[in-house]
Amino acid sequence: MLKRGQLVTTAQFNTGTVTTTAGVNTVTITTTGTLSNSNVGQQFRVGTADPIYTITAVSTGASPFTVTLDQVYEPASRIAQSFSIYTAYKALPSDFHAFVSVVDPNFMQPVPFSGSVLQIDKTDPQRAAAGSPPRSLSFFDYYNNLPRYELWPHQRSAYVYPMVYEYRPPEPWDAAAFIPYWMPADIILERAMMYCAMWPGPDETRPNPYFSPRMGLAQMHQSEYERRIGILEKQDNEHMQQNIWYQSEQVRNTPNVISGSWMQQHDMS
């Protein structure tokens, strides 16, 4: 149930100026650079006191660009102001369930992910803190049906944070659903045959010839199904311990953990 992935931040875009209108969800950016659909999903902000918005659309063509925000711009109208477009909230894969590990290779330490946005609000309500390493990765919201996490302090440079996460198994009715390789198809067949043997048929005149619910075919298929599930559980327990934490709470909440690389560099045997 584990997968590897990457949390990627991009360098901020702050070339040019922006004009905003209070109560309107579009802003006009005049720049010598280029904006495109790759900026959709990133965050937009003027200064450090105005709210942070998410970009939902960018006009095509040349400057000036019309950028659509996820909310109307409520602060007072701005004319030819400096701005920033960067990644403050990271959307995670659709099969994401929970983090197992996120690391910062540059600073040789894990990125804590057990905090909350409320803790960040108390520490930095203006979100004016900057610099590396990030000290918190906290659940923020759902956006386009995907969970988003806030990486704080907000990273304004391009960087990659390797991660391991526990994934959500596909639902049987998902379009891309598949039978995992460790699940033999005949186990599913045994379960289906059990239900077939428990179905009496559409009516009395058309009985199900396979109907045998008590101490018959249904019981036989259920016993075989449970026997094979027991084999799978045994194999699973032999492969990996169950009912344990992937990380201790102490490790997850410690901001600076001495890594093997740090010990090597400091001659700690």
Image (cartoon, grey):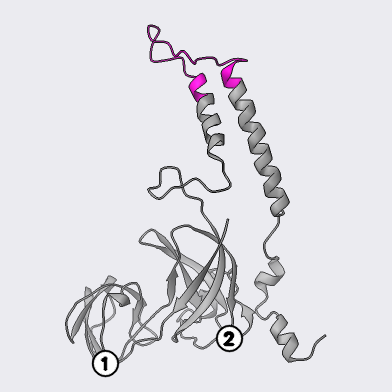
Q: In which image quadrant can residue 9 be found?
A: bottom left
Q: Which residues are magenta?
A: 195-219
User: Label 2 belongs to which residue?
Assistant: 106
Q: Secondary structure at mark 2?
A: loop
Could you tell whether 266 is left or right of 1 in the image?
Answer: right
Q: Secondary structure at mark 1?
A: loop
Tell me the quarter of the image containing the C terminus: bottom right
Please, what is the three-letter code of the amino acid marked with disc 1?
Gly
The answer to which of marks 1 and 2 sits earlier in the sequence is: 1
**Residue 242 makes an appearance in the image:** no
User: Label 1 belongs to which residue?
Assistant: 16
Q: Residue drawn at (22%, 80%), measured in percent from left and top?
A: 27
Could you tell whether 74 is left or right of 236 in the image?
Answer: left
Q: Residue drawn at (50%, 29%), measured in percent from left and top?
A: 192
> Which residue lies most toward the top here?
205
Q: Residue drawn at (49%, 16%), measured in percent from left and top?
A: 210
